Amino acid sequence: MAFTEYYDEIYSVARDIFEHPELGYKENRTSALIAEFLRKVNPDIELESFSTTGLKTYLGEGKTLTVGFIAELDAVYAPTHWRADPVTGAAHNCGHYSQVAIALALYKHFYATGLYKALDYNVAFVFVPAEEYLDLEYRQKLLDEGMISYFGGKPEAMKLGIFDDIDVGICVHAMGGEYPVRTVEINCDLAGFLYKKYTFRGKASHAGFDPFSGKNAYSMSTLFNVALGLARQQMKDAEKVRMNPIVMHSDMSTNVIPNHITVGTDLRTQTVEYMKEAAAKMDAAAEGSAIALQGEVEIATQMGYLPFVQNRYLSTFVMEAFEASGEIQDILNNNAISAAGDIGDLSYMIPCIQIGYSGFFGTIHGDDFKEIDPEFIYEVFPRFLTDVFERMKGRIDREQLYRRSFAAYEELLASIMKTE
C-alpha cells in the first residue's frame, strides 16, 4: 500500500529531527536535513529559502490555484523533557518534528507517483521556523539587527510574501494525551494572545531597621496576582481566558524592601475584541495594585498571535475522507482550546485548517510527551491526507475562499496595540 514502502525512511528522518531539537530561527540542522531529503527525492527541485531556516517548494505549475501544506520546524524550550538537548534545553514535545516527516512523506509520494500532475491545483510545501513564542531575547536581537520583523515564523513569512501565491493553507498538529483508538481532529479553534510585562516600582529601605520608609514592589505584584485571581469570575466563559503571571527578573534581598519587580504574563482569548477588553481589565488591576501601595507600574505589551478559527468549508473534505477511511476509528470536531499558534495570523490572510492526529502519549509541551504509534503517524495518517487532497481535486469552490493583504493584517495588529 502507498506509504508502507516509505515508512522506514520517513520514520528515520522523524527520529533524527526528534533527537536533535532546535529552537526557532535556529533550526539549521533541521532545515539542512529537509533540503537533503528533498533533493534526494527530486534532484531537480527548486528550493526557496526564507527567514533564516525556512524552505518552500512546489509540485505542479501553471495552475490557477495553489494549496499549501505547512510544517513547523522548531522545538520548545523544555530542559526537563526526557529527550531535551542538554546544551540548549530544546525538546520536541510539541510534535513539530512529526509534521516535518509527514510533509516529506507526502512530497515523496506525490512526486514518485506523479499524483500531483492530476490535481487541478499546485501544491506548495512550506517549512516554517519559529512557531513557538519563546527565546524572545534572541529574537529581539534578530529584530534589532533587521534580520526579522516578527517573533513568529508565519507572520515573518507573510511579510516576506511567502504565502502571496498560496490560496489555501493546510497544517497538521500532534494531539497530546493517549487515545483508545486512532483519532483525528478538525475545527479545533485556538486562542490568540498578547504578551504583557508589568514592572512595579516602589522605594527601597532596610527591611529590619526601617521598613516603614519603603514601598514594597513585590507586595504590589502579589496584590496584582490576587486581583487577577478575583477578576477571573468576571471573564466570559466562552472566551476561555487564560493568564499566567510569573516573576520575570528579581534581585531581591531579604534585608531590603524591594523597589522593583517585573511580572510577565500572556493573555489568551478566543476573539480579538475580547482580547482588548480583558487587557484593559488586567492593566487596571496592575495600576490599582500599584496605587494601593503607593507605587507605580510600567506596562509593556507585545502582540502575540491572532485567534485561529478553522475554515469549516475546507474541513468538509477532511470529514469526507474520515467517513471513507477504514483505518481511522474516531474524529473530534468543534473543540475550542486556549492553546495558540501563528496559524491564526495566516488564517487572517487566507483560509486555513489544522488537522490533529493522535499517536502520542503525555501532555503537549510536557516532560512526558512521546510518540507511541509511529505506524499511524508516518504511514496511515499521510495516506489519509492524500485522500483529503484527492477529494479537493476539482471541487474547491473559489467563492468560499478569501484573501486579505498583509497591509490589512498590519492594520489589525496596529488597532489592537493602539487600544493598549
Image (tube, rainbow, N blue to C red):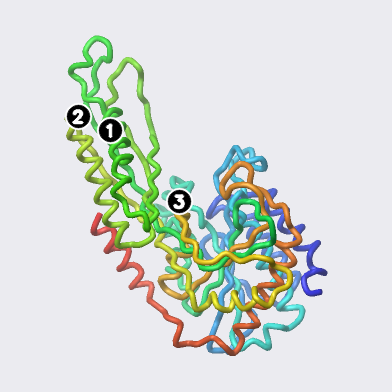
> Dot 1 surroundings within 10 Å: few (below 14), some, or many (20 or more)?
some
Q: Earlier in the sequence, mark 1 or mark 3?
A: 3
Which residue is the site of mark 3? 139
Contact check, label 2 and label 1, Cβ < 8 Å: yes
Residue 314 lies left or right of residue 253; in this view the side is right
In what quadrant of the picture does the N terminus appear? bottom right
Q: Amino acid at mark 2?
A: Leu
Which residue is the site of mark 1? 223
x and y percent of residue 110 in the render? 71, 78
Q: Which mark is in front, 3 or 2?
A: 2
Residue 282 lies left or right of residue 342; in this view the side is left
Q: Residue at x 63, y 47 (%)?
A: 362
In what quadrant of the picture does the C terminus appear? bottom left
Name the secondary structure under disc 1. helix
Tell me the number on the disc at residue 293.
2
Q: Amino acid at mark 1?
A: Leu
x and y percent of residue 79 in the render? 59, 39
Is residue 128 or residue 273 the one in the foreground? Answer: 273
x and y percent of residue 301 in the render? 31, 50
Res. 49 visible in picture: no
For the residues labelled 2 and 1, the Cα–Cα distance comes to 9 Å
Name the secondary structure under disc 2. loop
Dividing the picture into quadrants, the one containing residue 59 is bottom right
